[in-house]
């Protein structure tokens, strides 16, 4: 089931995403002691900062100490490297939380000690990460690249067919850096909720393909066809020329 929410302004998307996260968090915490959420890198970082941190009303309602945070993909670089998805989350969410003296979530990163110059340890980094991943995530927040990739699952890549590993390595990512680890479709398929966030006219051509009549097999379209609840939070520019019906969250 795919639901599309569209907005004029970037701030409105951030607030809508934040309210959506809060609703799922509250629902999960009625019966569970922790909220298991996965985040992505790229443009999602600033949406999280705007929605979850800059908005005082939301910020204070988040049960930060009950969050277990995972990364839908991670670049195989040091955790203080500018390409690291953890670095982005740290800058956008964790450091501001510390500034506000708020409790920090538990954040599951790649094991930095295993990083090396060659690719020898990459598989070990992936399996170590997989070991920490719960069988079900309550929510996965995804980006949609202009080529239709999501996580580090790229169009026509062999990883689109990976079903035995939940976390896989990729050494030929078309978008730099080339060495990464990523969720595979079995993880996404088993998640309770998935939300994409896509903003700007640069995303419109690929959204026209993903939501068009012709099947594309683009990674984001494959996610749309999974038997899980999938939501899209987009702005009107990204939705330009896309024939779908959208509402407000
Ligand atoms: O490389 C990546 O790109 C995607 C999409 O990024 P965006 O900036 O176009 O939203 C991102 O979701 C992923 O985590 C990241 O590693």
Image (tube, rainbow, N blue to C red):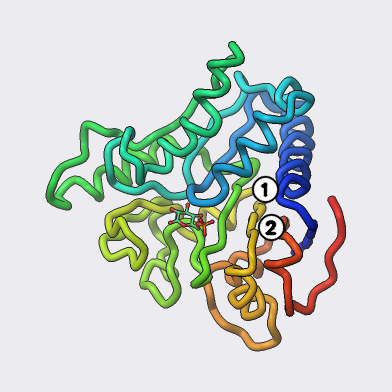
Q: Position of residue 151 (x, y in %)?
A: 48, 56
* Relative horizontal placement of residue 126, taking residue 21 as reference (left or right): left
Tell me which residue sits at (59%, 75%) in the image.
Answer: 206
The residue at which mark 1 appears reads as 192
Q: Quadrant of residue 238?
A: bottom right
Q: Residue 183 shows which numbered tag?
A: none
Tell me which residue sits at (77%, 30%) in the image.
Answer: 26
Q: Position of residue 209 (x, y in %)?
A: 62, 80
* Relative horizontal placement of residue 91, taking residue 221 as reference (left or right): left
Q: Residue 228 shows which numbered tag?
A: 2
What is the residue that sits farthest to the bottom in this orientation?
A: 214
* Relative horizontal placement of residue 26, taking residue 187 as reference (left or right): right
Q: Quadrant of residue 59?
A: top right
The kind of secondary structure element at disc 1 is loop
Quadrant for the N terminus, please: bottom right
Residue situated in front as seen by the camera: 204 or 32: 204
Residue situated in front as seen by the camera: 143 or 164: 143
Q: Is residue 31 visible?
A: no
* Relative horizontal placement of residue 116, taking residue 185 as reference (left or right): left
Mark 1 vs ligand 1: CB below 8 Å? no
Q: Quadrant of residue 217?
A: bottom right
Do labels 1 and 2 touch, CB within 8 Å?
yes
Q: Position of residue 42 (x, y in %)?
A: 49, 51
Instruction: Using a 10 Å C-alpha cutoff, classify the residue at mark 2 as few (fewer than 14 neighbours), some (14 to 19) or many (20 or more).
Output: some
Cα distance between the residues tagged 1 and 2: 6 Å
Instruction: Using a 10 Å C-alpha cutoff, classify the residue at mark 1 as few (fewer than 14 neighbours), some (14 to 19) or many (20 or more).
Output: some
The kind of secondary structure element at disc 2 is loop
Q: Is residue 135 above or below residue 213?
A: above
């Amino acid at each position: 089931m795919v639901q599309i929410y569209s907005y004029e302004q970037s701030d409105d998307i951030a607030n809508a995403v934040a309210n959506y996260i809060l609703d799922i968090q509250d629902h999960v915490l009625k019966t569970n002691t922790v909220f298991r959420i996965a985040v992505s890198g790229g443009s999602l970082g600033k949406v999280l900062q705007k929605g979850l941190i800059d908005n005082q009303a939301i910020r204070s309602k988040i049960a930060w100490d009950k969050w277990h945070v995972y990364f839908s993909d991670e670049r195989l670089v040091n955790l203080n490297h500018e390409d690291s998805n953890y670095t982005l989350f740290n800058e956008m969410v964790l450091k501001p939380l510390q500034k506000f003296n708020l409790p920090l979530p538990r954040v599951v990163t790649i094991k930095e000690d295993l990083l090396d110059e060659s690719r020898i340890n990459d598989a070990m980094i992936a399996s170590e990460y997989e070991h920490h991943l719960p069988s079900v995530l309550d929510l996965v927040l995804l980006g949609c690249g202009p080529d239709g990739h999501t996580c580090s699952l790229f169009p026509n890549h062999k990883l689109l067919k990976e079903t035995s590993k939940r976390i896989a390595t990729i050494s030929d990512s078309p978008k730099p850096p080339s060495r990464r680890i990523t969720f595979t479709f079995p993880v996404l398929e088993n998640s309770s909720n998935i939300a994409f966030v896509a903003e700007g006219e640069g995303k419109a051509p690929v959204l026209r393909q993903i939501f068009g009549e012709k099947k594309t097999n683009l990674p984001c379209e494959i996610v749309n066809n999974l038997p899980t609840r999938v939501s899209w939070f987009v702005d009107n520019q990204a939705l330009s020329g896309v024939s779908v019906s959208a509402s407000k969250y």
